[in-house]
Image: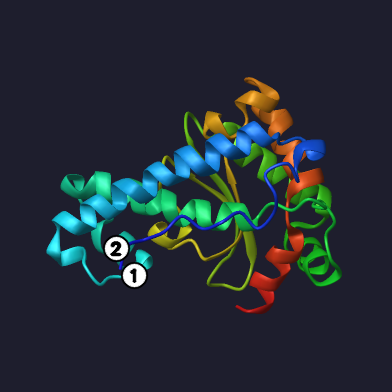
Amino acid sequence: MAFELPSLPFAYNALANRGMCQETLELHHDKHHQAYVTALNGFVESKPELQGKSLEEIILMVKGKPDQAPVFNNAGQHWNHILFWQNLAPKGGEIPHALSKKLVEDFGSIEKFKADFKAAAASQFGSGWAWLVLGSDGKLKVTKTGNGSNPLAEGQGKVLLGLDVWEHSYYLDFRNRRPDYITNYLDKLANYEFAEAQLQSA
C-alpha cells in the first residue's frame, strides 16, 4: 500500500496570526511534503525489498547505506513531517503541567530548555531539524539532525517535538531570520500538549 500525505490537523490559515501564513503551509505541506511522499512511493515500487515495510522499517533498513541515500532522505522527511504537522497548534506555546515539571527537572528551567532548543536549531548548518526527545535514560534532551535524518535513525530517543529548519519552512514569514522563526515556534506555535502526550505514552 502506497504511503500517503496526511491532512493538516488544522486549516491552512489557522496559524496565520501566530507567524505561519497560509502560503507557507500550502507550499510546505502540499508541495514539499507531497514531493517526499511521491518520491518514496516511486522507490518502494521499484525496489521489491522495500515493499510491505513500514515507514520506520524502511528508515532503519536503509540508514547509513550511501547507495540508498535517496530512499533514506525521502522516507526520513516523510516521517519528520508527519510529526511536524502534529507539533504545530493554532493555540500553541502553552506548556501543560506534567511536561513543564519534567522540563524543569531535566533542564533546570523552562528558559534553559528554550535556550538549548534555540541554540540547536539556530546552529544547524544548512538544512535539518531540532528535536526535543526523551532519551533511553529517561531524561529529556535537545538534539539536532542534518537534512532528512531524525532521532529514529540516530537512536536518540522518542520524539516529543521537532522543528523543521529547512529554509522553505520559514522564508515567507521570516525571510532569513531563522532565530526569530525558532523563538516564534517555541512561544506561539509549539504544540506542547502533543509533546506531553508523547511523554506520557513513553
| Circle 2 SS class | helix
Above or below — where is 31 with respect to 99? above
Q: Residue 87 sits in which quadrant? A: bottom right
Q: Is there a contact, CB below 8 Å, between mark 2 and mark 1?
A: yes
- Residue appearing at x 58%, y 52% in the figure: 84
Q: Is residue 73 left or right of residue 144?
A: left
- What whole-number distance in Å separates the C-alpha atoms at marks 2 and 1? 6 Å
> Dividing the image into 4 quarters, which one contains the N terminus?
bottom left
- Residue appearing at x 15%, y 66% in the figure: 49
- Residue appearing at x 34%, y 70% in the figure: 54
x, y (%) of residue 16?
A: 76, 37
Query: Can I make out residue 91 in this image?
Result: yes
- Would you name the residue on which mark 1 appears? 54
| Circle 1 SS class | loop
Q: Is residue 111 left or right of residue 66?
A: right
- Would you name the residue on which mark 2 appears? 58
- Residue appearing at x 22%, y 58% in the figure: 44
x, y (%) of residue 194?
A: 70, 65
94 vs 171, nearest the viewer: 171
Q: Check disc 1: other Cα within 10 Å, few if <14, some if 14-19, many if 20+.
A: few
Which three-letter amino acid code belongs to the residue tagged 2?
A: Ile
Query: Can I make out residue 165 in this image?
Result: no
x, y (%) of residue 167?
A: 54, 29
